[in-house]
Image: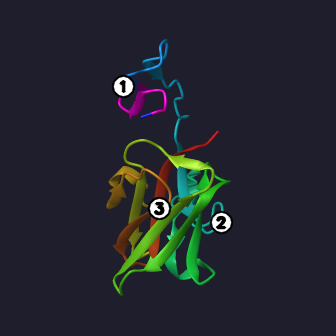
């Protein structure tokens, strides 16, 4: 409750900040404030060693990328890849931490970006390079709805990973 007797709450379904009157509200205060901010359209973000390295379909102009586990950069003892929106816009990084001898934790760190609403974090593991394979992230074996960054997903340890994120750039 605010000092002037109002109790605010947020209704995400209706994008409203609802302010309910307490026992002694200040006269003339506003009851409902509508949030008019609508996040920009989400963009496609893919993990890569560097922009354009290890593309799924290099001959068809598709810029979607995957990473080779054995070639991940090591930064401060942590295996790391980078996230790119569009083809070259840095959007954050991904870390890989061995959970067990059979699984790895993949953690997304967005930098200046926020996850889009709905299902937005996808991972597909491969034992051979997925050159020429279909890249429909909705068909990836592992997916979840991330609400904030960082976020971690545990997947099987393998040789290659396609990692896709739907996010929007923060204003």
Above/below status of 63 relative to 36? below
Q: Is residue 21 left or right of residue 85?
A: left
Q: Nearer the viewer, residue 55 or 25?
A: 25
SS at mark 2 in the image: loop
In the rendered image, which quarter is residue 109 located in? bottom right
Q: Is residue 134 visible?
A: no
Is 156 left, or right, of 130 in this rendering? left
Q: Which residues are magenta?
A: 2-18
Residue 123 at what x, y percent from top left? 40, 62
Tag shown at residue 163: 3
For label 3, count other residues whose C-alpha is less than 10 Å away and answer few (under 14), some (14-19) or many (20+): many
- Real-space Cα separation, disc 2 to disc 3, in angstroms: 14 Å
Residue 55 covered by magenta stretch? no
Q: Residues within 10 Å of mark 2 (few under 14, many from 20)?
A: some
Q: Is residue 127 above or below residue 61?
A: below
Under circle 3, the secondary element is strand
Q: Name the residue tied to disc 2.
A: 50
Residue at mark 1: 22
Q: Are marks 2 and 3 in contact (CB under 8 Å)?
A: no
The answer to which of 86 and 109 lies nearer the viewer is 109
Q: Position of residue 78 (x, y in %)?
A: 56, 80
Is residue 130 left or right of 47 when viewed as pictured? left
Label 1 and label 2: CA atoms lie apart by 55 Å
Q: CA distance from mark 3 to mark 1?
A: 48 Å
Q: Quarter of the image for the N terminus: give it.
A: top left
Query: Does the residue at mark 1 contact the one at mark 2 (Cβ under 8 Å)?
Result: no
Which residue is at 42% across, 18% downward?
A: 31
């Amino acid at each position: 409750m605010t000092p002037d007797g109002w109790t605010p709450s947020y209704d995400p379904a209706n994008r409203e900040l609802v302010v309910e009157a307490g026992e002694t509200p200040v006269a003339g205060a506003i009851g409902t404030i509508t949030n008019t901010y609508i996040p920009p359209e989400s963009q496609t973000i893919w993990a890569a060693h560097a922009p354009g390295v290890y593309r799924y379909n290099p001959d068809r102009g598709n810029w979607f990328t995957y990473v080779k586990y054995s070639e991940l950069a090591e930064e401060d003892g942590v295996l790391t890849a980078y996230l790119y929106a569009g083809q070259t816009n840095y959007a954050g990084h991904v870390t890989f931490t061995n959970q067990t001898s059979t699984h790895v934790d993949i953690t997304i760190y967005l930098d200046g970006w926020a996850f889009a609403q709905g299902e937005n974090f996808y991972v597909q593991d491969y034992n051979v390079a997925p050159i020429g394979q279909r890249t429909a992230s909705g068909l990836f074996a592992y997916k979840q709805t991330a609400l904030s960054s960082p976020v971690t997903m545990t997947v099987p340890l393998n040789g290659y990973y396609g990692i896709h994120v739907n996010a929007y750039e923060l204003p």
